[in-house]
Image (tube, rainbow, N blue to C red):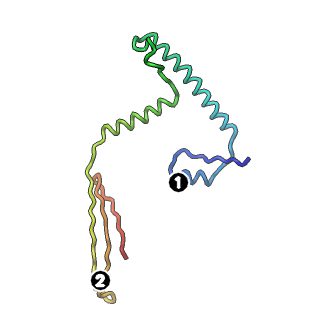
Amino acid sequence: DKIYRAKFSTVLPQEIHRALKTLGRVNEYFVQAVQARSDHDLRVGAAFTRFQTLRLQKNFDEFADGSMGVVSYGPCQFPTLGFVVERWARIETFIPEDFWYIDMSVTLNDTAEGNAGQSESNDAQEMQHRNSNHDAYTSNN
């Protein structure tokens, strides 16, 4: 009775904080649904792995002696493989781009009435990357 559930679908900090602020009771129906999906995935995966391995061994010489092992199937493997291939393709087509930093310091002497002789020093840092400027302005006062 003292078990609560945090519901979130991303690992972004704001999403996790929201989930922790809105804890709910464990829904036994959801627990059973997850267990049913898990059992189904295991059974379908085991059955289809056996089917396709035997089929390939029967129809292709490369698989005939069993040295190629099993040809695994699982409902989660296809989306996961898609993520891996997509990441691999991004790495393969990556084109490095130069970037640089410009650091500068500016000191202004204020000669306005009442501020004579006072100076203000500010540092600015600008980063140029991919044809866009990202400015950061900090005051040393």
Q: Is residue 3 left or right of residue 68?
A: right
Q: Residue at x 53, y 18 (%)?
A: 50
- The earlier-in-sequence mark between 1 and 2 is 1
Q: Residue at x 60, y 52 (%)?
A: 20
Q: Residue at x 69, y 37 (%)?
A: 29
Observer-nearest of 61 and 4: 61
Image disc number at residue 102: none
> What is the x, y in percent for residue 40?
60, 27
Quarter where residue 140 is shown: bottom left
Which quadrant would the C terminus be assigned to in this image? bottom left
Q: Residues within 10 Å of mark 2 (few under 14, many from 20)?
A: few
Number of numbered discs on residues: 2
Looking at the image, is 112 positioned above or below residue 84?
A: below
Q: SS at mark 1?
A: helix
Q: Amino acid at mark 2?
A: Asp
Q: Amino acid at mark 1?
A: Gln
**Pointer 1 and pointer 2: residues touching (CB < 8 Å)?**
no
Mark 1 lies on residue: 14
> What is the x, y in percent for residue 109?
27, 81
Q: Residue at x 54, y 51 (%)?
A: 15
> What is the x, y in percent for residue 4?
67, 48
Q: Is residue 9 left or right of residue 101?
A: right
Looking at the image, is 31 positioned above or below residue 44?
A: below
Image disc number at residue 110: 2
